[in-house]
Image (cartoon, rainbow, N blue to C red):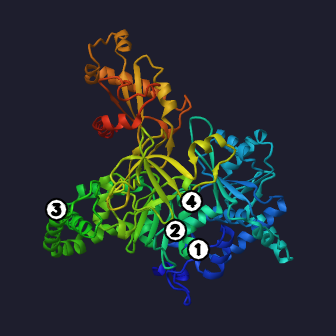
Amino acid sequence: MTSAFGHFTQQPQSNRPAGFRVTGAHLAELYANAARVWGDMPAFATRRQALEWEPTGFRELYNRGCFLATALIDLGVEPRDHVGLLGDNRLEWILADYGVQLCGAADVPRGRDVTDGEIAFIFRHAGIRTAFVETETLQDRLLRLRGKLPELREVILLDPRAKPAEGVRRLSGLIETGRRLRDAGDRRVEERVAQISPDDLFTLIYTSGTTGEPKGVMLTHANMISQLERIPLEVTCTDRVVSILPVWHIFERVFEMLAVSRGCCTFYSSVRTLSDDMRNIEPTFMGSAPRLWESIHQKILKRVKEAHPVRRGLFHTAYFLSHYYKESVFFLTGRSLDLKGRGRIRTAVLGIIHAVRWALLLPWYGFFNAAVLEKLRLVVGGAFKGSVSGGGALPREVDQFFNYLGIPVLEGYGLTETSPVIAVRTPSKLVIGTVGPVIPDTEIRIVSLDTEKILYPDRSRDDLGRGLKGEILVRGPQIMKGYYRNSEATKAALAEGWLRTGDIGIITFNDCLKIVGRCKETIVLSSGENLEPAPIEMRLNQSALIDQCMVVGQDRKYPGVLIVPSLEGFSELGISMNHRSELNGRKEVRQRIAAEIRQRISHKEGFKVHERLHAFGLLPEPFTTDEELTTLFKLKRHVVTEKYRAEIDAMYHRAEAER
């Protein structure tokens, strides 16, 4: 690490090989083992200002966790209690998690953007009696809701700079209380840890939803430990990891626990300071979301566009060479996307072509890579080994750009219900356009969307059903225990250990998983925000100007909507047409539809910011039961998405141009 961090240089202990890792039967045991093995090496680092980071060692973190757990036990937290944890990434969040795990309880986390309605439902449903809150604002909101939360007894403030209200405890005060109790011989933590079973919950995560109530995903210690033992990422105690994703999301959380098990330091950054931190820390790994890479991609292209013509020409030449050079490397190393199964002759011919191209481009690529592309890679620091992108699909052009540039983006796939990793790309299996191979001890099925027939693995076929599209079912040690106090939802999602993901996928001929869409209604934006389209569609369909509509936006920055306009409704406004296709070209028609969307999908109507529609397209034909609708008039979303893919792309291009 640079000299600015000289007082806590990240080096392996002399008697520990760099690839050494620790786990345990449960997280409390993992934390104890990490403290014993990694000792005073930095586990987490908090940014004080540029180039100034305050480290916390593994042993110190564990000891403070034991102090907090002792104080929580003294407050009356029982084994397997549910403890609320409202806040975003910071050391105090991890301290609270340590305390909760070490006293044998389970945390119920949410971010600072949680709504009052969600707090009220989650706290009542989970039976929360003790809760941590990060900020004064969250504290005040929770206290205002206290009348609706009869079971809530204790509120603990995490931010050491915030002022606690009357009756609210400080985290630091509890840690000091626990320190005194342990100094006096209190060993109740050890008794609690001995009682923890791998099948106990370590967390209860409530998924967002705008239809019905949120569902509490029950994840066990065994679920998390299975992830730490099986995720095939080469992260070691010499690595530096940057944290920017919400830690209450299971994806970021498993990444931080992976860092703990491998003995490397996690640096808490933010979107605001990320650019400076990447240069100063020179991280080697990070968890990320597609939106981050889209943003960096746009900034690089903008910088290139504004550059001197000579520099612009050098970049385009360098990237052209890198694109085709890396494409040949990917093919020759078996990492080129194969959805149809290439025959031996075709593979041999393509292999010769790529080998010749590789040899011709090698010297030119080598020069331009060192002279031009190396400087661009400094945007993520000078030591970057890779990033796992999750929470949504990377746009293919962004995926190609960074991997051809030499910044490995290892896209992964999973759900909260799967702890979360089902599949992840690795450097040796970095197949652009896929989420990589399924991780060890995880089974995948691809089943027909219409008949439920198993398409993959089909033992009657030589190719086992590779290349066939259907719903993804998954079974393995990472699958949730179920939805808390919701047997009906659990039964609908789980059958004989198989979880229905609601995602549509394909197993490629190089044995990677490719996600091609969703068969369930939930839409996941590129930011990772979830939204349910049904309430939005219901509200829009109440308009006299709209006959039918379908919300889209999977893996996009914001949601949009396809609209079948009402000829009758516009006729009543004096805008008469013989066919809907004529409406799309009328400026006043688009203005009227835009006004309807703004009025009906607004904060006033109860919709969140990420649910606002920023793009729309008008369709020339209504949805029919012959194609886009079931016999019960439900939308076949995958059919509509496929049929109108060009219209969807066009409306997003138009929306971007108008913004």
Choose the circle earlier in sequence order: 4 or 1.
Answer: 1
Determine the secondary structure under disc 2.
helix
Asked if labels 1 and 3 touch by Cβ distance under 8 angstroms, the answer is no
Find residue 526 and report its horizontal and vertical position in percent: 43, 49
Choose the circle earlier in sequence order: 3 or 2.
Answer: 2
Residue, disc 3:
313
Asked if labels 3 and 4 touch by Cβ distance under 8 angstroms, the answer is no
- Residue sitting at x 25%, y 20%: 582
Find residue 25 and report its horizontal and vertical position in percent: 66, 70
Find residue 248 and report its horizontal and vertical position in percent: 59, 55
What is the number of the mark on residue 512?
none
* Alpha carbon distance from label 3 to label 1: 44 Å
Asked if labels 2 and 4 touch by Cβ distance under 8 angstroms, the answer is yes
Residue, disc 4:
478
Q: Is residue 454 something that shows in the picture? A: yes
- Asked if 637 appears above or below 1 in the picture, the reply is above
State left or right for residue 593 relative to residue 587. Answer: right
Determine the secondary structure under disc 1.
strand
Choose the circle earlier in sequence order: 3 or 1.
Answer: 1
